Image (tube, rainbow, N blue to C red):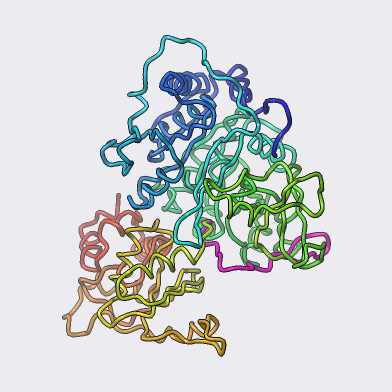
Amino acid sequence: MNGSATAPRLSTRFERAVRRHPGRTALVAGGRTLTFGELEEASRRVAAGLRVGGVEAESLVGLHFTRSADLVIALLGVLRAGAAYVPLTPSHPDSLLAFVIENSAARLVLTDGDPARVPAPPDVTVCGTEDLPETPFTTLDAPAPHPHQLAYVIYTSGSTGRPKGVEVTHGSLDALLTALERTVYDTGPAACVGWNASPSFDASVQQWLRLFRGDTVVLIDERTRTEPEALARLIVDQRMSELDISPAHLLLLLDPLEAADLARPLRLLIGGEQIGEALWKRLGVLAESGRVSSVNLYGPTECTVDVTAALIDGAEPPHLGAPLGHARVQVLDDLLRPADEGEIYVSGESLARGYRGRPGLTAERFVASTVDGGGRRMYRTGDLVRRRGGRLEYLGRSDFQVKLRGYRIETGEVEAVLERCPGVGRAVVQLEHDPSGEPALVAYCQSSASLSAADLRAAAGRQLPAYMVPSVFVLVGRLPLTDHGKVDRAGLSVLRAAPEPVASPQDGPLSETEQMVAAVWSHLLGVEYVGPDDDFFTIGGQSALAIQLASRLRRVLGRAVPMVAVFENPTLRGLSTYLDQGRGKD
């Protein structure tokens, strides 16, 4: 069990911040700026409406919001009502959202959109915060949450084809915030923190928690997140002092960030995937300048966001650092004995309660501790490390789980979705590199001749969030097998022969702009020919490559090309026409 026997400090932290700094800016989001006093009043109204409507401890409330101030108001309202929230990203497929709502047993979903468009069962109430019952109460009728009560359930990828909900308690949240304050956060003036992560990604928790200590949170809109130059400008304009970011996203931001005239030193909180040696060294050079410092944070969702931290100075090779104060990190071998090289096991206050409605899986991953005793649990992370000079050096995974652009993905879930497609006999998905050299999911499918990569990409997109849809599909008559009759995963990459031309030269001459764009596409996607009607995303593009595409076009043209233009004009002809009309100057 997590937490102490008394109510966690988290239950009173926000109210204390409001009392101390009612006029300080608490939140900047979607063109709105709210002080702590205004955010307190708005979230209290939501909390009171939820309580009057029957929401109580252990109730789960779905949050179906865009990246707006209303999301934060609703989230705080749920927590202040003593309940727990379930993030529902509107851009995710309806089938996935419907599963999460049903599996979590949420009986209420709050949204800032059309309630009719939320794929909830008939017995689930869907409404906006303005539709909650009104109450004349001036005080909030909600007891302080017990440390063992749920605070949120975040769904992560699962190997069976369905995601699994990780149940995190109020006590674990309080322990996380306390540990970060003692180890990572600055003790000086109030910070201005950029909230970059998706609410469905547990890194977001670390960002909204900053409101509980009186810091200002800037919720970064979706368009700015995907435009490196725009994000760098926002960092300067808002005088940000901290930003959470994944290594893959940071690689795109570094150039404009190094060129920016930062108003104050910036600290990067980096997590979600392994930092490569080249990026680690570059961050070390930045640290020497005194303008940008970086912290490498590691932790599974099941251990409440972060359990280790390492200050990056470039003097040492990449490592995970030391445990935070709320977690005990052990390296154990296959017999659960302490070892210099083995799997990370985590115990302590950071542990989640388990998986929603999955007692068998909970018992499999949260095992009895062999080092703590007293009936305590420890979580099997699946992450392999080596002890070196008092540091933990990351070696990889012990299973088929991967991390891509900050998201943890069970490749088995993607495989299960693809194998449900008619005509697919077997699917194997693994992390490799796309034609531009960036990490990407590659799907090898044993399939009928009537199927195409576009068919499978569309089918996957109807059931999986965009970050889980493979970038590359390799369709074959049969998959290579080992002597034991299993798929030869090591030999799969040889099936990725040189790409077939996606359009023939007989398509006719291309305009000057089309030739320029086609050359960029060809380099990024590894295709020989690009025709005027080819779609960037159909022939292998994905969101990370779209960011690179927009960035390269900006360098070639010498003017702004927002990434949204790639999504709105995905064909070669459409994007070229957009650029010729000069709308890239916006």
- Residue 517 visible in this rendered orientation of the protein: no
Residue 312 vs residue 54, the one in the foreground: 54
Which of the 4 quarters of the picture holds residue 442? bottom left
Relative side of 467 to 131, left or right: right
* Rendered location of residue 245, percent (x, y): 55, 51
Residue 63 coordinates in the image, percent (x, y): 42, 37
The residue lying toward the viewer, choosing from 554 and 526, is: 526
> Looking at the picture, how far across and down is residue 197, in whole percent?
50, 47
Residue 510: quadrant of the picture: bottom left
Instruction: In the displayed orientation, state which residue is furthest to the front.
Output: 360
Q: What stretch is highlighted in magenta?
A: 386-406
**Above or below, comparing residue 168 to residue 340 in the picture:** above
Residue at 82% from the left image edge and 48% from the top image edge: 373
- In the image, what residue occupies the spot 36% across and 47% down? 98
Drawn side of residue 247 relative to residue 423, left or right: right
**What secondary structure characterizes most of the magenta part?**
strand
Does the magenta-highlighted stretch encompass residue 405?
yes
Quarter in which the N terminus is drawn: top right
